Amino acid sequence: MPAALTSKITEQSVWFITGCSTGFGHELAKQLLSRGNKVVVIARNTQALTEFAGKDNALVLKLDVTDPVEVTAAVQAAHTRFGHIDVLVNNAGIGYFAAVE
């Protein structure tokens, strides 16, 4: 990360991470929470997020990023809980796995 960015990210930073049900998003949320950051942990399937539920520094939300109404509601919930968002990790998506010809 550029020095200008990393100097502004602290343990008090609020992270908004989509696609946390598996993989990179899940692991990033886990690492940030263990370091004391505040994290909005987002996935379409919140059953995969049970390990984050009940943590004071986590807000678990169900969100389909293709629905503008849900996006607006999620951002508002983050602002209500933590007051602001410092870092967005737009990690939601699905892969298309097939042979390349």
Image (cartoon, rainbow, N blue to C red):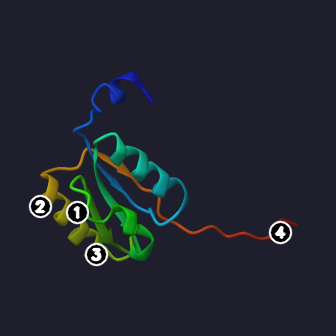
Front in this rendered view, residue 86 or 29: 29
Name the residue that disc number 1 marks: 75
Question: What's under tag 2, amino acid-wise?
Answer: Thr
- Mark 2 → mark 3, Cα distance in angstroms: 15 Å
Name the residue that disc number 2 marks: 80
Tell me whether the residue at label 1 lies in contact with that at label 4, contact meaning CB atoms closer than 8 angstroms.
no
Q: Dot 2 lies on which element?
A: helix
The numbered mark at residue 70 is 3
Q: Dot 4 lies on which element?
A: loop
Question: What's under tag 4, amino acid-wise?
Answer: Ala
Mark sitting earlier along the chain (2/3): 3
Name the residue that disc number 4 marks: 99
Mark sitting earlier along the chain (1/4): 1
Residue furthest top in the image: 3
Dividing the picture into quadrants, the one containing residue 61 is bottom left
- Mark 3 → mark 1, Cα distance in angstroms: 9 Å
Residue at (21% x, 55% y) in the render: 56
Quarter of the image containing the N terminus? top left
Mark sitting earlier along the chain (3/4): 3
